[in-house]
Image (cartoon, coloured by chain):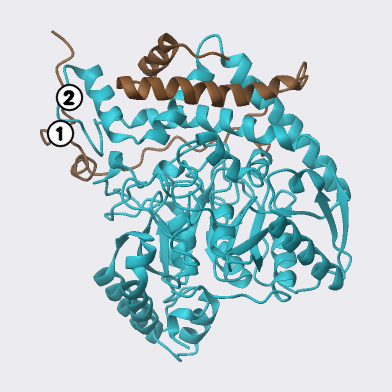
Chain colours: A cyan, B brown
Amino acid sequence: MDIYQLTAHEIRDMIKEKKISSKEATQSALARIHAVEDKVESYVTVLEEEALAQAEAIDANIASGEAGALAGVPMALKDNMCTKGILTTCSSKMLYNFKPPYNATVTEKLLEAGTVLLGKVNMDEFAMGSSTETSHFKKTKNPYDITKVPGGSSGGSAACVAADEAYFSLGSDTGGSIRQPASLCGCVGMKPTYGSVSRYGLIAFASSLDQIGPLAKDVTDCAMVLNQIAGHDPKDSTSVNIQHPDFEKALTGDIKGLKIGVPKEYFGAGISGDVSAAVHAALDNMKAEGAQYTDMSLPLNEYALPAYYMISSAEASSNLARFDGVKYGFRAEKFDDLIDLYCQTRSEGFGAEVKRRIMIGTYALSSGYYDAYYKKAQQVRTMIMNDFTKAFETYDVLVTPASPTTAFGIGEKTSDPLQMYMADICTVSVNIGGLPAIVIPCGYDASGLPIGIQIIGKPFDEATVLNAAFALEKTITKVKPNL
Amino acid sequence: MKISKEEVLHVAKLARLNLTQEETQRLMADMESIIGFADKLNELDTDGVVPTAHAIPMQNAFREDEIKESYPREEILKNAPSTDGDGFLIPKVVE
């Protein structure tokens, strides 16, 4: 077995036990990038020399006994997380040349823990999309079938982990942008509770929904990374000041007596038979481990997607107002006056999907429509949250599919925006509720494409969600992509 | 919900976007279908329901108002599309 195939916690342990060096782990990942990146195209920026220098410095630290918790483990960051002096593009022409003067809090925390930054990975432009096809730079491919999409918007993060081009990655999730690509690429992805992980230095899409989380090779890696990035940050006034448990230690594998609710609305029209069957088989595996599951109902689920698109687009139209060609990024060459400089810059700098969301959001916030769309969606948000609160009085976790289908073809859904939005039908309600949820692979369809299962928990109960996923993971045989 | 060309152009003006003919046509159709999809929310009676802006209940986060060092000017101006070294340059707005 080559080093690049190992999980992040195996790499961490082997470096700690001095069986390999960080440099060797980094070289192996870089060699893998050289070998398969032509096919997968998950990176926007590869930091070859920087990563090797960083690994050597960490190896020296390890030798002198000053090593962080993840000392020497190489990883990749989604290109909407600020990295000091390193390109952070959001996969947009608007930020094609942007080098942040500071690190995002997650970047800072991972560097303090001793990880090595291999590069920045591709995404849908400004995280708006479900296939990574709206990236200004390239179309990332699904490592299981390079004619298929990796999902999105954290498609680069999922694909680089699935293709063994990084030991782990971070993504961001506004309506499913970590979980849906994790499902399509057969890796583990977690959206923590809103407020668990600082958003400082994450280029904002929809501030009341965005949350950063890990994309990893297994549940242990996911818990290990979450341990490093969770926690209060005075620089993010929405980050919550609570004591998080040790998530890795919470992985006992014991789920005896765990009460699982299975909302029937997530298995209706549009959910493929393969997906439904694999999720039910996984539920039976969990039952065999001592959990109990019951069919139940979340009757308002069908309203989550329209509410989500109103709220997220409204917040996006406000957040993206800052991109005007004055302080950073792209500026149009030809303009008549200041207002025209703004308009031309934004018209040339943003892609079609970003413009569409800005238009929808601006419409929903505009005079005469605010109450009918934005306020209405926020009221529906309250009702959906109440549904979840009620469900969690009875159940410890809820289990659903992660995506209605396995990976779809490149170009298959780009002509109809609503059809693309439907790809998020299993994931958006979790963001509306601010809840923690994990996706892990639970099977493969007839063409060998991964099927994901989603486990949703109570606010700040990541430990239960992770442990349930850990217990299930032990019953699943994973298949690596054949690149 | 019918979206007129005038509405699209009005919203584009609010959003500081110059749209081509083609984009305007496309957005008329797209906005009509997406806004139409959102009209589904009207099936629900939300009278008296308090809107939620934020999923996790929390109060304002305050900190001490202390004077701290900011970023060096040249670091911030490195990303500026146009600068004279002291500030951001924009077209003249005052006659």
In percent of width and height, residue A324 lies at 29, 29
Q: Which mark is residue B82?
A: 1
Q: Is residue A193 above or below residue A464?
A: above
Q: Is residue A175 left or right of residue A327?
A: right
Q: Which residue appears at 33% of the width and 34% of the height? A: A350
Amino acid type at image mark 2 = Ile
User: Residue A362, image x and y in percent?
Assistant: 47, 21
**From the viewer's perspective, is A135 left or right of A431?**
left
Q: Chain of mark 1?
A: B
- Name the secondary structure under disc 1: loop
On screen, residue A13 versus residue B47, left or right, reads left
Q: Observer-nearest residue: B94 or B28?
A: B28
In the depicted structure, whether residue A355 falls above or below residue A79: above
* Relative vertical location of residue B23 with respect to residue A139 in this rendering, above or below: above
Q: Residue at x 17, y 31 (%)?
A: B87
Per the image, the residue denoted by label 2 is B90
Number of residues whose C-alpha sits closer than 10 Å to that of mark 2, classed few (under 14), some (14–19) or many (20 or more): some
Label 2 and label 1: CA atoms lie apart by: 7 Å
The chain holding disc 2 is B
Residue A317, how many percent across, how many down? Answer: 45, 28
Asked if labels 1 and 2 touch by Cβ distance under 8 angstroms, the answer is: yes
Binning the other alpha carbons within 10 Å of mark 1 as few (below 14), some (14 to 19) or many (20 upward) gives some
Quadrant of res B42: top right
Give the percent coordinates (x, y) of residue A318: 45, 27
Q: Amino acid at mark 1?
A: Ser
Q: Give the vertical position of B94 relative to A313 (above or below).
A: above
Q: Looking at the image, can residue B17 be seen?
A: no
Of pointers 2 and 1, the one earlier in the residue sequence: 1
Judged from the image, the secondary structure of the residue bearing numbered disc 2 is loop
Q: Residue at x 69, y 40 (%)?
A: A433
Q: Is residue B56 visible?
A: yes
